[in-house]
Image (spheres, rainbow, N blue to C red):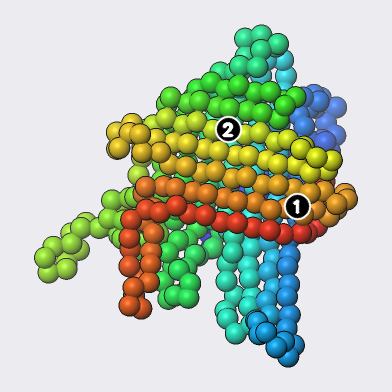
Amino acid sequence: MKYTFFTLLFILTFAANGQILENETNPTKKDTSYWSHKNQAGLDFSQIAFVNWNAGGNSSISGLLKGDFVRKYVKGNVIWNNEMSIRYGVNKQEGRELRKTDDAFSFLSHYGYRKVESSNWFYSARFNFNTQFTNGYAYPNTDKSISTIFAPAYIFLGVGSEYNRKDKNFNIYFSPLTVKTTLVLNQRLADLGSFGVTKALFDEEGNLLRRGRKSRNEVGLLVTNYWKKEFYKNMFVENRLSLYSDYINNFGNIDVDWQIQMEMVVNKYVRANIGVHLIYDDDIKAKEEVNGQQVTVGPKIQLKQALGIGLIYSF
């Protein structure tokens, strides 16, 4: 719970930062005209109900709470962009327990400097942090969690170069030196060696010799790409791609995180969206049910597709 408290405190502080700057009454306050900000919160939902429906079916309701917060500083040849994103979704189906459908917290900060203001190339440094809020389970098994807050959490810190076209909503970042840290702060999951950390060591009689490690560090190559385009009136497509390969362990084996989302703007407050999220990470082992037992198998492609319509509010 303490991790959740500090995370929520960070979110509130970040979201309020723009208002604090604007409400400053000190006559010697600093010029904040180089800062821009965007706050956006939304709720997507879907519902289906059956009463004496001959073809059968289970009533269900789903909801997804999401928020995106941006703070950007632009002055001369310097750009400093900060983005925070949260997602949390649940589904309740008749005759079944409440289940989580989405859970993500992400914070990205990158700093860029260019020699001349007319250039689109920047020297860049980038920090990225990702985790989740609540326990995850391999449904229908809810006896033991397969993930928790900060288990895993991923930290990327690197330097490189960036090509940025603001007029085209296009960005590509290349870092030949990026440190990736995987955190698994849940000791039970660390002992199992979840998410690629070193698992616990036992002797032949099952006695614990060494606890599993709660972190793992890698150094590798990172390439990211972002672009957004209005392909038809009030219809947008957004692409986010991240490719990472560790220099020491199986260089050339690429971790992929790829998101594509299409958004249709109905009006100022109502939007429909469809998205696909694909992940492949060699350190994440899939679980399958064999003869009623959860068995860990090799890494597999993770794929999530979502379709929703909901309310959006910008402030």
Q: Residue at x 63, y 78 (%)?
A: 93
The residue at the point 51 percent across, 25 percent down is 174
- Relative depth, front residue between 272 and 34: 272
Amino acid on which the number 1 mark rests in the picture:
Ala
Q: Position of residue 277 (x, y in %)?
A: 57, 50
Is 203 rendered above or below residue 150?
below
Pick whichever, 255 or 191, lies toward us. Answer: 255
The image position of residue 225, as x and y in percent, is 58, 32
Q: Are marks 1 and 2 in contact (CB under 8 Å)?
A: no
Pointer 2: what residue?
225
For the point 58% across and 27% down, the residue is: 172
Q: Between residue 52 and residue 268, name the one nearer to us.
A: 52
Number of marks present in the image shown: 2
Q: Which mark is residue 300?
A: none
Mark 1 vs 2, N-terminal side: 1
Separation of residues labelled 1 and 2 (CA atoms): 24 Å
For disc 1, the neighbor class at 10 Å (few under 14, some 14 to 19, many from 20) is some
Above or below, 153 against 122 in this view is below
For residue 41, which numbered disc appears in the image?
A: 1
Query: Where, by quadrant of the figure, is residue 64 drawn?
Result: bottom right
